[in-house]
């Protein structure tokens, strides 16, 4: 008999929980970073979100960066550069 290991997806993982960053009360005057995941139309979605954030919420400027590939996490350099420039960051999910 060939025993395959069973992984219980409800058991949780061994990773430590990461504390979420504090959320601003509003976006007026903030610099917002948008991270393009390189999937189809992600750039269009981000441009639309950026325009809406400026027009509806008073965001002062938008910084857009693009990951190398959708299947890879953003590089430390991209994350560090964005962290120096923005107060709020959003990752895109293109389709």
Image (cartoon, rainbow, N blue to C red):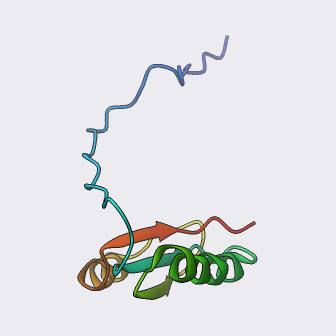
Number of callouts in the render?
0
Q: Residue 88 is drawn in which quadrant?
A: bottom left
Q: Is residue 29 above or below residue 6?
A: below
Residue in the foreground of this view, choosing between 52 and 89: 52
Q: Residue at x 29, y 49 (%)?
A: 20
Q: Residue at x 32, y 32 (%)?
A: 14
Please indicate, yes or no, whether residue 67 appears anywhere in the rendered image.
Answer: no
Relative image position of residue 58 (x, y in whole percent):
45, 80
Q: Residue 87 is drawn in which quadrant?
A: bottom left
Q: Residue furthest top?
A: 1
Q: Residue at x 37, y 64 (%)?
A: 26
Relative image position of residue 75 (x, y in whole percent):
38, 76
Describe residue 51's horizontal placement relative to residue 22 as left or right.
right
Please indicate, yes or no, whether residue 86 appears anywhere in the rendered image.
Answer: yes
Q: Could you tell me which quadrant the N terminus lies in?
A: top right
Relative image position of residue 43 (x, y in whole percent):
66, 82
Q: Residue 49 is drawn in which quadrant?
A: bottom right
Residue in the foreground of this view, choosing between 40 and 29: 29
Q: Could you tell me which quadrant the C terminus lies in?
A: bottom right
Residue in the foreground of this view, choosing between 78 and 71: 78
Q: Residue at x 24, y 46 (%)?
A: 19
Q: Is residue 74 above or below residue 51?
A: above
């Amino acid at each position: 008999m060939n025993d395959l290991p069973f992984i219980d997806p409800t058991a949780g993982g061994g990773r430590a929980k990461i504390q979420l960053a504090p959320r601003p009360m509003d976006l007026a005057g903030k610099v917002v970073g948008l991270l393009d995941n390189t999937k189809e139309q992600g750039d269009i979605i981000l441009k639309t979100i950026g325009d809406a954030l400026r027009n509806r919420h008073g965001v002062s400027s938008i910084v857009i960066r693009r990951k190398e590939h959708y299947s890879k996490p953003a590089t430390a350099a991209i994350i560090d550069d964005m962290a120096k420039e923005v107060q709020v960051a959003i990752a895109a999910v293109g389709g």
